[in-house]
Image (spheres, helix red, strand yellow):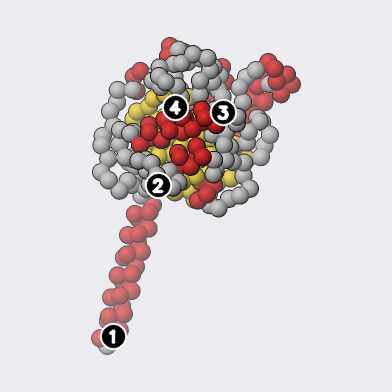
């Protein structure tokens, strides 16, 4: 056989092997569908727009979108439990009543068949972040999950920051949030969900993302920016660290709250550094249903 033909055949074989290896490597990494949704607090002041009249619409959105992970904001204990009972295929995490949790929570739901809970916790945006504060402070809950198919682990944080006129409070909350994410127990990928009450470009958001590289914390990316989207509402965000990438992001425009549900498909990558094994200490201290 002509030597050139042999070389071409060998080259083609190598290209096919490399392609198969690349496909195998990519398929071994999970793609996670995540939703953030401020469902609006259950209050009698809403009258005909109250939770009792909106609940089924909220649940329909969650069922129709079929996200792997759902983070809600402004959920009262009753709302959290009703969603949990209506979504039997999901495991639910939020601080239980014995934690002293009052007012809203930022609960997280994830598909039981898809993920194993390795660790979890909650902190408050206050001077005593590890203790329930007085009044109605904003809060962040988090879970550390392992994908059952691939063994890849990652964090999901779900938060609610202070409202529009409280820029000073949001700045301090962004600083605490950036610090907590940067000092998590392992360097596994991060998905940050929430109602941030601010747009991309806000000073506090720039700090959280470390947009100008001026803080000691790693840079993160807003999914809206990743996909150059300019149409969606910019108060609710899905933010990712460098080991996670948004493949798609969309808005469910079904009217069921004063916010819309935001949904993103996210490629989870293996972190560049070797992760530290997470401690299990918090799992038995919180309410997981």
Q: Secondary structure at mark 4?
A: strand
Q: Do the residues bearing badges 4 and 3 touch, measured as CB atoms within 8 Å?
A: no
Q: Do the residues bearing badges 2 and 4 touch, measured as CB atoms within 8 Å?
A: no
Q: Secondary structure at mark 3?
A: loop
Q: Would you call the spot at circle 1 few (<14 residues within 10 Å), some (14-19), or many (20 or more)?
A: few
* Left or right for 223, reference 284: right
Q: CA distance from mark 2 to mark 3?
A: 24 Å
Q: Earlier in the sequence, mark 2 or mark 4?
A: 4
Q: Which residue is mark 3?
A: 166
Give residue 110's position: percent from left, percent from top: 46, 32
* Left or right for 79, reference 212: right
Residue drawn at the location 63% of the way across and 33% of the way down = 259
Q: Which residue is mark 1?
A: 4
Q: CA distance from mark 4 to mark 1?
A: 62 Å
Q: Secondary structure at mark 1?
A: helix
Q: Earlier in the sequence, mark 4 or mark 3?
A: 4
Give residue 99's position: percent from left, percent from top: 42, 14
Residue 148, by quadrant, is top left
Residue placed furthest toward the bottom: 2
Q: Nearer the viewer's eye, disc 1 or disc 2?
A: 2
Q: Which residue is mark 2?
A: 213
Q: Earlier in the sequence, mark 1 or mark 2?
A: 1
Please name whichever residue, 254 or 167, is drawn nearer the observer in this view of the structure.
167
Q: Nearer the viewer's eye, disc 1 or disc 3?
A: 3
Q: Which residue is mark 4?
A: 141
Q: Is residue 77 visible?
A: no
Q: Secondary structure at mark 2?
A: loop
Q: Nearer the viewer's eye, disc 4 or disc 1?
A: 4
Q: Earlier in the sequence, mark 4 or mark 1?
A: 1
């Amino acid at each position: 056989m002509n030597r050139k033909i042999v070389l071409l055949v060998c080259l083609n074989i190598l290209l096919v092997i490399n392609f198969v290896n690349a496909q195998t490597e990519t398929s071994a990494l999970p793609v996670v569908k995540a939703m953030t949704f401020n469902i609006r607090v259950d209050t009698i002041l809403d009258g005909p727009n109250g939770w009792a009249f909106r609940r089924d619409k909220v649940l329909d959105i969650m069922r129709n979108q079929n996200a792997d992970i759902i983070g809600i904001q402004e959920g009262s204990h009753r709302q959290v439990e009703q969603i949990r009972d209506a979504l039997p295929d999901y495991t639910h995490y939020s601080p239980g009543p014995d934690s002293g949790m009052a007012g809203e929570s930022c609960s997280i739901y994830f598909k039981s068949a898809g993920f194993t809970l390795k660790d979890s916790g909650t902190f408050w945006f206050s001077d005593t972040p590890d203790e329930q504060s007085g009044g109605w402070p904003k809060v962040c809950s988090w879970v550390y999950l392992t994908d059952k198919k691939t063994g890849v682990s990652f964090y999901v944080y779900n938060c609610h920051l202070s409202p529009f006129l409280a820029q000073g409070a949001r700045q301090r909350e962004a600083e605490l949030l950036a610090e907590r994410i940067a000092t998590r127990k392992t360097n596994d990928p991060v998905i940050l969900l929430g109602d941030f009450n601010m747009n991309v470009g806000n000073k506090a958001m720039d700090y959280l993302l470390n947009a100008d590289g001026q803080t000691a914390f790693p840079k993160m990316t807003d999914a809206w920016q990743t996909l150059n989207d300019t149409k969606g509402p910019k108060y609710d965000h899905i933010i990712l660290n460098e080991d996670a990438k948004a493949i798609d992001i969309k808005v469910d425009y079904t009217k069921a709250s004063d916010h819309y549900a935001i949904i993103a498909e996210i490629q989870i990558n293996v972190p560049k550094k070797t992760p530290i094994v997470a401690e299990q200490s918090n799992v038995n201290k919180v309410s997981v249903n």
